[in-house]
Amino acid sequence: MAEELVVTPWEVKGKVDYDKLIKQFGTSPITAELEKSLVSVTGEDNIFLRRKLFYSHRDLDKAIADFKGGKGIYLYTGVGPSNPMHIGHLVPFFFTKWLQEKFGVNLYIQVTDDEKFVFKRERTLEHITKVADDDIRNIAAVGFDPDKTFIFKDTEYIDHIYKLALKVSREMNYSQVKSVFGFNNMTNVGLMFFPSLEIVPTMFEKKRCLIPDAIDQDPYWRLQRDMAEKLGYHKAAQIHSKFIPPLTGVEGKMSASKPETAIYLTDDEKTVKSKIMKYAFSGGQESVEMHRKLGGNVDVDVSFLWLRDFFEPDDEKMAQIEKDYRSGKMLTGELKQMLVDKVNALLTKHRANKEKADSAIEKIKYSGKLAQKMWETTFE
Amino acid sequence: MAEELVVTPWEVKGKVDYDKLIKQFGTSPITAELEKSLVSVTGEDNIFLRRKLFYSHRDLDKAIADFKGGKGIYLYTGVGPSNPMHIGHLVPFFFTKWLQEKFGVNLYIQVTDDEKFVFKRERTLEHITKVADDDIRNIAAVGFDPDKTFIFKDTEYIDHIYKLALKVSREMNYSQVKSVFGFNNMTNVGLMFFPSLEIVPTMFEKKRCLIPDAIDQDPYWRLQRDMAEKLGYHKAAQIHSKFIPPLTGVEGKMSASKPETAIYLTDDEKTVKSKIMKYAFSGGQESVEMHRKLGGNVDVDVSFLWLRDFFEPDDEKMAQIEKDYRSGKMLTGELKQMLVDKVNALLTKHRANKEKADSAIEKIKYSGKLAQKMWETTFE
């Protein structure tokens, strides 16, 4: 029996059928036409769109129209600081950086330390704060516009958003959060209130908000879209990504509690190599002879999928890799080594940026133009 | 069929059977011995205790022991600012003032503007804030120790209590708030989270907190007592009052939506007289002749009950009133006029105090010793 598919902000179980999620969540696929329309505005295509990692949306067409028509848009995304960030966490931030560069608009990044604290009773705020501060450093290292980006931890910014969160909270009852998030009798009241906080930044400006994030966050936006216009705001638009699959196989999501499933941003070169060589699920054959004869299965080979989704932006090279791997000309070990090199190159660069991120952090948290304005604003 | 008895923080329906509530909520009656023990500490008795308006408790004996033994205690009470205050709202504050004077301890007063805002969708924050600020003025007029009292609106102080509220919220799941508060599928997530906020001030000091309030607030304290020691705090002690009955009869509670049920603190002398003469439910007989013959029923006569519970502190006078009214010597009109005079005397004095309350408000909100300390503190 196939494992049941469960996708919520807190759980991804089973092999994710992304087309099914589009139907289940009521979102729309990004058509070739829509992708073209986006590229006509940004003036540049993007690996994540070409490779269909960002594949689903809501009102992306309207966001493009608002931008082109002069009404303007803004960007919003976030991170939940429960455990150190892995490669999969960086994806939406790289894509968001690209969107900000192309649109030249404000970006709000919410660090949901409150959510991650209430999610499990045994967690200490000290631990969550440590992770959150490291996440902020990683995000700053991606390099956002220091005057058009504001990053905040909920517990630090609560004074400015609590009143609006209360207004949002009145629009969601137990029935709704139960059906949308799968909450139940055992869910604590902190986690039940939290969606109010995640919805608030979609109301930071009286413009349409475009949210680049993974598809598992969609339940929040369904609720947002039910209430936004009634409260005098725009329905938020989204552009949803698939998950980068876990190293260990295409089911579920990279998990911090299973280190073999993920590459952490702190993994050194040796660890990266050893994890990929040891754990990356292979679509290759059992022996070199068999592989040469039958070729590799690119649909399940995680090294191939990581290269395709994220690490090999050159389409020609990628096509060659696919051809060679499918034909058996390229062996699993060779494929894995390519990935190891790409991952280590990215992480080395990322860690160098992270070392130098002090000034960027200070700006996007406090002293940049947008951050300054946000600390002077209280939302009601 | 008798109307069903419902008592929650948001609803009081039916004739309240106070002995039944003690059993239902699992509290204890204040025995003669316990009252004596309290009076031996305070050095003075109190009308509300003598007349059994404050009639139920939890761990009052332990609070007295902590005070006598040098461990110390502190006081905590509050108000929900949905509608202008009436006479019934003042009761716990007068009693709390007496307790603070006798014990000489810190007092925290929470103004739950967030609760009242989320309770009904159609309420504006502007309205709630106006009511809250007027409530604070009324409370300040009661006259608390300016250096040992801190009054705060939740939305203003949230930055200092949000983290601890999150910790508290993890200890209450939907099953529990459903059973304790009668929440259901239609309850919004704001109201479901709110109990976390009301519980936080019971953890402001590492001493036992004694809460003087009406018995309908007890559900919060049941939850508090389930979690307090696990989180490293004391179980809160309470001393519970009955409700001053509505003018219109002994069932339910004074209601802001039914002006005839209550005397507001803003009612002028003429209004007070007209409301009492017109609406105060009488235990007298239909005609003067019948009344002289049969006498009045003090168990249902609201004017009598108000004098007994609150307005006539002189025990001898009160006994004489009871004797005269029961016997038919005193007529309903005479009884009502006594109450009119007492209520108007209290309100006139209260309004004069309210006029002069600016400096007291400033101190208990911001610049008094305790208030200053509280604005420098963040609870986790």
Image (tube, coloured by chain):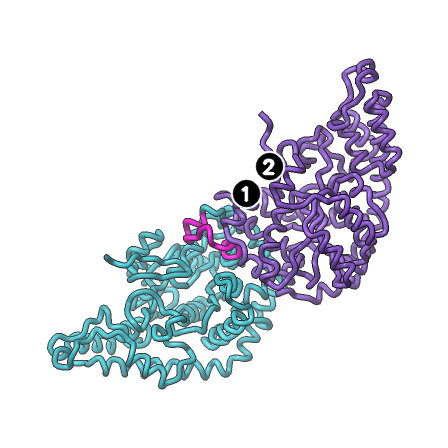
Chain colours: A purple, B cyan
Disc ID at residue A6: 2
Which residue shows up at 38% across the image and 55% down it?
A: B58
Asked whether, in this view, residue B140 is left or right of residue A66, the answer is: left
Is B165 placed left or right of B272 in the picture? right
Query: Residue under mark 2: which chain is it in?
Result: A
Looking at the picture, do discs 1 and 2 lie on one chain? Answer: yes
Q: Where is residue B74? Give x, y as percent.
A: 48, 62
Which percent across, then down, holds residue A21? Answer: 64, 40
Magenta span contains residue A19: no
Three-letter amino acid code at disc 2? Val
Image quadrant where residue B278 sits: bottom left
State whether residue A67 is above or below residue A137. below
* Dot 1 and dot 2 residues touching (CB under 8 Å): yes
Q: Residues within 10 Å of mark 1 (few under 14, many from 20)?
A: some
Task: Identify the magenta region.
Answer: B176-192
Find numbered disc 2 in the image and state the secondary structure of the residue it sits on.
strand
Q: Which chain is home to disc 1?
A: A
Report the front residue among A224 and A127: A224
Residue assigned mark 1: A182
Task: Identify whether A222 is placed above or below B352.
Answer: above
Does residue B346 appear in this view? Answer: yes
Residue at horizontal 28 percent and vertical 82 percent from the top: B338
**Seen in the image, is B19 located left or right of residue A4?**
left
Q: Residue furthest front?
A: A33
Q: Position of residue B184 (x, y in %)?
A: 44, 51
